[in-house]
Amino acid sequence: MSRNIFLFISSQVISDIGDWIDRIAVLTLVYNINNSSVDMSFLSIMMLLPSLIFGVFAGKIVDIYNKKKILILGDFLRAILVFLIPFFKEYVFIIIFIVSTISIFYDTAKNSILPELVKKDRLRQVNSLSSSYSSLMMVLGPSISGFIISKFDIKYCFYIDSLTFLLSMIMIFLIKLYKYGSKKDVELYQTDKISFIEGLKYIKGNCIIFNTLSINTIVGLAAGMLNGLLIMYVYKFLKTDSQGYGVILTFKGLAMILTSLVLYKYLKNVLVDVIFKLGLIGLGISTAVFPLNTFFVLAILIQFFNGIFNALYSISRTTIIQENCDNQYLGRTFSMNTMLTNITSIISLAFGGIAAEFFGVRAVLLIGGFIVLISGFVARNKIHLELTS
């Protein structure tokens, strides 16, 4: 592993575990203040809204300015803001909104900077390794946060998260950029007159990118209702509690870790579009099968397979964008992808909740699974034809 990749992955690991500790702490803090479900919903909106408001602007800024400096500034500002939460609890919604806004710029830069760190033929390996550690932090983070909250004061969660941002900032500072793009990419990258409209035209004209974003938007329509209703199905049909729900998510996270490592080590030569299609189809099947089951042990197994296909889909999707998008448009492409995903997720959250009242949770989950499955068969034709042409 090169020095740059070691620093980049280490920065992400430290930042991710801090984010999970902070996320659980924020949810707990907001719930304890007023014990209100309305406040919890409002908090979710504050986390999603910045991508809809600033997504377009973030993509352009990332494409024009130095991505490394954006990452360093993002870590520094979030370290200060998170540290202030215990002292200004009454302003927690405002602080979270600002932190989420900064994160839009940070995440867009993080996804866009990889082609400047490694050659394109290594992008999938790095994405796989990055995904495996992110999944590991998804498993460990909530447990660490729960332990800190139960044994110490909740404020220490925010202090730890602030420290992880500072450590991440130092590691990003030590990274050296090389820009592995083509000569044309570098020349265009150095111009600052690329408008967002030109970015949209580029996305529309690049069939691989356009089809990938379109398919991901379709998946987003299913993701919102699935994420919102899964816990209800676990409680109602599997007859378990929050601990059982946590066990199911833990096994899903473990599957994502293992799949990412296998993809990194053993599937280097498998075509990325094959992995993309396999991930989508498997994700659709496992999602559709899950609401047909009422046995807890079988539910764990299904979600384990769901985690496998989820990892295949997310890693290959990111790699396809990075490999087939010119460097000067990467920021806008990733920000557009985030915007479309969040918009469709919000729509499907609202639709899923209403539809579940009329048709039941099981029926809505089945619909979500079939939507993902159909998108897999659409990808089978569109992405393969473009990548092989």
Image (cartoon, rainbow, N blue to C red):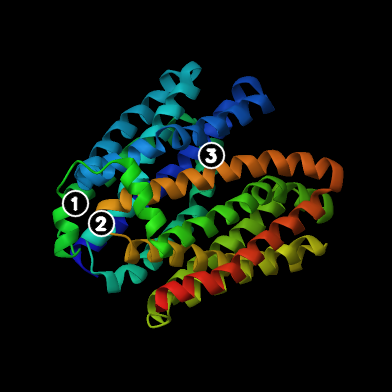
CA separation in Å, label 2 and label 3: 35 Å
Q: Can residue 42 be seen here?
A: yes
For residue 41, side relative to residue 101 (left or right):
right
The label number, if any, that marks residue 48 in the structure image: none
Q: Percent from the top left, x then y, of residue 255?
A: 55, 68
- The residue wearing badge 2 is 327
Q: Percent from the top left, x then y, of residue 110?
A: 32, 50
Q: Which part of the image, by quadrant, shows the C terminus?
A: bottom left
The residue located at (21%, 59%) in the rendering is 116
- The residue wearing badge 3 is 24
Secondary structure found at label 1: helix
Q: Percent from the top left, x then y, of residue 302?
A: 69, 68
Q: Percent from the top left, x then y, of residue 204?
A: 41, 55
- The residue wearing badge 1 is 189
Q: Which quadrant would residue 264 be assigned to in this image?
A: bottom left
Q: Is the C-beta separation of discs 3 and 1 under 8 Å?
A: no
